[in-house]
Amino acid sequence: MKVLITGGAGYIGATLTPFLLAAGHQVRVLDHLAHGGQSLLGVWAHPGFEFIGGDIRDREVVRAAVAGRDAVVHLAAIVGDPACARQPDLARVINLDAPLALIAESQSAGVERFIFASTCSNYGKMKGTDQYVDEESELSPVSLYAETKVAVERALLGSGSSRNWCPTPLRFATIYGVSPRMRFDLTVNEFTMEMMTNKQLKVYGEQFWRPYVHVRDAAGAIDLVLNASPAIVGAQVFNIGATDQNFQKKQLVEMIRPYAPDAVVEFVHKAEDPRDYRVSFAKITNQLGFKTTRTVAQGIAEVVQLVRENIIDNFAHQKYRN
Ligand SMILES: NC(=O)c1ccc[n+]([C@@H]2O[C@H](COP(=O)([O-])OP(=O)(O)OC[C@H]3O[C@@H](n4cnc5c(N)ncnc54)[C@H](O)[C@@H]3O)[C@@H](O)[C@H]2O)c1
C-alpha cells in the first residue's frame, strides 16, 4: 500500500515507519518535526520512503500529502493531558479541526483506509475496581486531550464504512519501549529511567491501573488493521494492548526495583484519580488474532540496557518529554 503517516517522526511514527517499509508498503511521512527529525535517519535513504516537511493545519500541504495514497495513519497531535492543558486553543486546532479537515481531504482524494491514533484515556475512570472496560463501555474523557480524541473518533465512526472508505480508530494503551524518537515522559520509560539515573522517583497515586503496550506492538497492530478485511475493521474501534498487561503504578516500581535497588521511591497518596482503568483487549485478539510480542517486564529490561550502555547522552533533556 501507499501509506501516509502524519507525525511519522514521533515516538510511535519513528517505529511504525520502518515497520511498514519492511512489510513492503511505501511510506510518506508528513511532520513538522516538533521534536526534531533525527528519528528518520534510518529510513531516509530507503527507496520506499518520502518526506513532506509541513503542518497538518496547512490545507495545501495536507492535499499534497494525501494525493495518491491508499491509506492514512494519523498520528500527528499535541500529545498528552499536560501538553494540551498548556495550549488549549492550539490543541483544539491541531487535535480536532486539523484531523477533521484531513479526513475530508482523504475522502476527496480517494484514500480508502484511515487509521486514527486514539487513546484508552478516553475511558476515564472505571466504575468498579475489579472490572475491565472494553470498546462498548461508556467514555468519560477527563481532559481536553481525551475530549478531542473522542470527538475525532465520533466523526470517523459517523463517516460510515463502504467499499471505498474504511475508517478505524485505535485506542492505544500507554506505550513503552525504545523507539528512534525516545519519550521519557511515558510511565514505564520514565519510571525506569528515573530509578536508574536519578535514583529517585515520585509516584502519584500508586494504586491506579493503566494498560501498557510496547511501541513495536503498536506498530504491528496498525499494520494488521491496514491489511484486515474492511468488513471487520470498517467504522470499528479497537483497543490496542493485552489484557494481562494492565498494571498499577506500584507494580511497575516493583518490576523495576531489582535493577535499581538503591533508588528512593516516594509514593504520594492520591485518593482519587480521574484516570483509573483496566482495559480488555479481547476484541482485537478475537476478531483479528492480534497478539502482543513484548511484555512490560521486557520493555523495562530494554530501557535498563539503553541506560546502562549510555546509548542516550542526556536523558533529562526536554526533547524526550512532550
Ligand atoms: N505514546 C502513547 O502512549 C500514546 C498512547 C495513546 C495514543 N497515542 C497517540 O499516538 C499519536 C502519536 O503519539 P507519540 O507518542 O508518537 O507522540 P509524539 O509527540 O512523539 O509524536 C507526534 C508527532 O507529530 C508531529 N506533529 C505534531 N503536531 C503536528 C502538526 N501540527 N503538523 C505536523 N506534524 C505534527 C510531531 O512533530 C511529532 O513528530 C498521538 O496522536 C497520540 O495521541 C499515543
Image: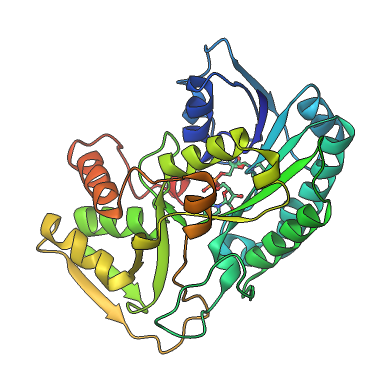
Find residue 126 and report its horizontal and vertical position in percent.
51, 79
Q: Residue at x 64, y 63 (%)?
A: 145
Q: Residue at x 81, y 25 (%)?
A: 64
Find residue 53 and report its horizontal and vertical position in percent.
68, 28
Q: Residue at x 40, y 56 (%)?
A: 242
Q: Is residue 199 visible?
A: no
Q: Residue at x 36, y 40 (%)?
A: 178
Quadrant that contains the N terminus: top right
Exactly how many numbered labels are in the figure?
A: 0
| 194 relative to 54, above or below | below
Find residue 110 and report its horizontal and vertical position in percent.
84, 30
Q: Locate residue 197 relative to residue 321 in the image: left or right.
A: left
Determine which quarter of the picture holds residue 57: top right
| 39 relative to 196, above or below | above
Find residue 112 and report its horizontal and vertical position in percent.
77, 33
Determine which quarter of the picture holds residue 258: bottom left
Q: Is residue 306 visible?
A: yes
* Front residue of this view, candidates 308 and 107: 107
| 120 relative to 204, above or below | above
Furthest residue toward right: 108
Furthest residue toward bottom: 271
Q: How is the image coloured?
A: rainbow
Q: Locate residue 95 relative to residue 240 in the image: left or right.
A: right
* Front residue of this view, candidates 58 and 210: 210
